[in-house]
Amino acid sequence: MRTLTPSSEPVDLIERYAYPPGGGTWLRANMVASLDGAAQRDERSGGLGNAADQELFLLLRGLADAVIVGAGTVRAEGYGPVKPRESWGAVRDGRPPVPPLAVVSRALDLDFDAPLFTEAAVPTIVLTAAAADPARLRAAKERADVIVAGEEALDFTVAVRELAARGFHRLLCEGGPWVLAQVVEAGLLDELCLTLSPMLLAGHPARILNGPPFAVPPEFRLGHALEEDDFLFLRYARSR
Ligand SMILES: NC(=O)c1ccc[n+]([C@@H]2O[C@H](COP(=O)([O-])OP(=O)(O)OC[C@H]3O[C@@H](n4cnc5c(N)ncnc54)[C@H](OP(=O)(O)O)[C@@H]3O)[C@@H](O)[C@H]2O)c1
């Protein structure tokens, strides 16, 4: 074992969280959990974070080409479209001003008249399956860029391939736990950015992954560990 030596030097987060060079598809997830593994506090994730976590959340959006998120999280957190941030500096030079959200949904129980769809600077994407209700699918297509992948449920491998074909290679998944478990199950997760929040919650909240156990658990190596206000910001890349 060794200690992680603290340094008072400020950290260049843009450099620390740069996607790997090379231009290939890279899927990173950003999640927050309490010390006892809770991914929810009062049915949301906001109560787990702090200002630094929020800053990182926004920066990771700025670095991404597209942001994948489950409809459960969109509904629970009241997602609107991504807005450009001054703090992004030049990270989006040569790219659209914001990354689109790519919302995973089969039921398409989404308000297509909400700002998420009507005020997005870059059209919101809907990732769905062929079995989606035809009327809702038509409504989705009027307001969103719809990608149909898979029959009964979204096939995440095909969806990620379709996103890459549209030029979205630097992908960020903001969960929730149900979607993230499937992303990992499909072998698509390259990196996990995990904020460890210094609190204990108990109860029965979801963990950051919610799904059946993996036959072969993927393993990760630590890229870095940053600290602010007793929160840890961990960046792990898949090792196998
Ligand atoms: N701690 C964190 O970092 C963090 C991050 C994000 C969210 N959260 C919390 O997690 C909770 C929400 O997470 P969740 O796991 O319940 O929901 P979720 O993963 O955000 O979304 C689940 C929804 O995604 C759609 N979906 C999932 N798999 C699909 C597939 N294969 N094909 C088609 N659609 C699919 C379904 O939408 P339809 O029902 O529309 O078909 C499903 O209801 C909230 O409390 C939120 O605050 C925590």
Image (cartoon, helix red, strand yellow):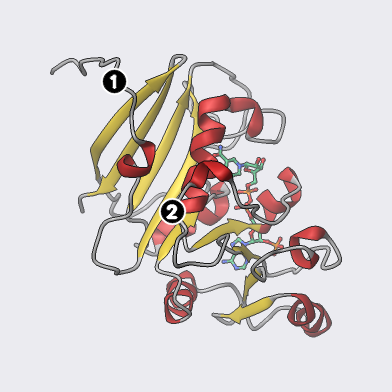
User: What percent of the width, then of the height, locates residue 91?
Assistant: 43, 53
Kind of residue at badge 2? Val
User: What percent of the width, then of the height, locates residue 12?
Assistant: 34, 35
- Quick one: quadrant of the N terminus? top left
Q: Residue furthest right?
A: 113
Quadrant hosting residue 188? bottom left
- Would residue 211 be seen by someone viewing this image from the given angle? no
Q: Residue at x 24, y 66 (%)?
A: 22
Gap between marks 1 and 2, in whole Å? 22 Å
Q: Residue furthest left?
A: 1
| 82 or 206, nearer to the observer | 82
Q: Residue at x 48, y 80 (%)?
A: 166
Would you call the spot at circle 2 few (<14 residues within 10 Å), some (14-19), or many (20 or more)? some
Q: Which residue is mark 1?
A: 9
Would you call the spot at circle 1 few (<14 residues within 10 Å), some (14-19), or many (20 or more)? few
Nearer-N-terminus badge (1/2): 1
Q: Residue at x 69, y 56 (%)?
A: 81
Disc 2 under 8 Å from ligand 1? The reply is: no
Q: Which residue is mark 2?
A: 91
User: What percent of the width, then of the height, locates residue 108?
Assistant: 75, 69
